[in-house]
Image (cartoon, grey):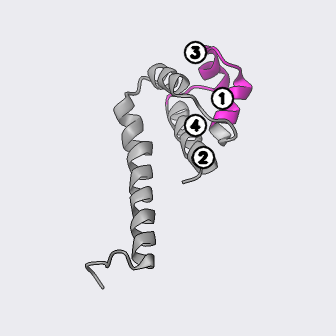
Amino acid sequence: MKNAQLNYRIGNYIRSIRSKKGLTEKELANLINVSQQQISRYEKGTATVSIDRMLHILCMLNLSMDDFVENIIIPEQENLYKKMFDELKKEGTIKSLYD
C-alpha cells in the first residue's frame, strides 16, 4: 500500500477514536503539543505521523499499541500478502490451491 493510502487509513483511525472519546482536534492537539492544523493534516492523511507522535497520540487516547496493530498494521500486512500472492500467481510462480 502506498504511503498516501496508509496515511489516510491512520488518519481515519485517529479521527474515529478521537471522536468516540469526545475530543475536538484542538483538544487532542493540546494534549500532544501540536497545532490543531497538524491534527487536521494527520486525520486527512496529508501528513505522515511519526512513530513517536503515534505513540503519544495512542497514549493520550488511552489506547495500546495492540489496538493500533490490530486495526492498522495487521490489515496492511494482509493486503500486502494478498498482493504478493496475486502477483506470484499471475507470474505463474505459484498456483492457487483452488484452481
Q: Which residue is mark 4?
A: 15
Query: Which comes before the other along the chain, label 1 or label 2?
Result: 2
Q: Amino acid at mark 2?
A: Asn
Asked if residue 31 lies in the magenta stretch, the reply is yes
Main SS of the magenta segment? Answer: helix
Residue 39 is situated, as x and y percent measured from the top left of the image, at 66, 29
Residue at 57% x, 25% y is 23
Q: Amino acid at mark 4?
A: Arg
Residue at 50% x, 20% y is 56
Residue 80 is situated, as x and y percent measured from the top left of the image, at 44, 57
Which quadrant would the C terminus be assigned to in this image? bottom left
**Inter-mark Cα distance, 2 to 3:** 26 Å
Q: Dot 1: within a 10 Å radius of its alpha carbon, few (fewer than 14), some, or many (20 or more) residues?
A: many
Q: Which residue is mark 2?
A: 3
Residue at 42% x, 23% y is 62
Q: Which residues are magenta?
A: 21-42
Residue at 43% x, 63% y is 84
- Does dot 2 land on a helix, a strand or a loop? helix
Q: Dot 2: within a 10 Å radius of its alpha carbon, few (fewer than 14), some, or many (20 or more) residues?
A: few
Q: Dot 3: within a 10 Å radius of its alpha carbon, few (fewer than 14), some, or many (20 or more) residues?
A: some
**Inter-mark Cα distance, 1 to 2:** 17 Å
Circles 3, 1 touching at the beta carbon (< 8 Å): no
Q: Which mark is residue 31?
A: 3
Asked if residue 75 is positioned above or below residue 87 in the image, the reply reads: above
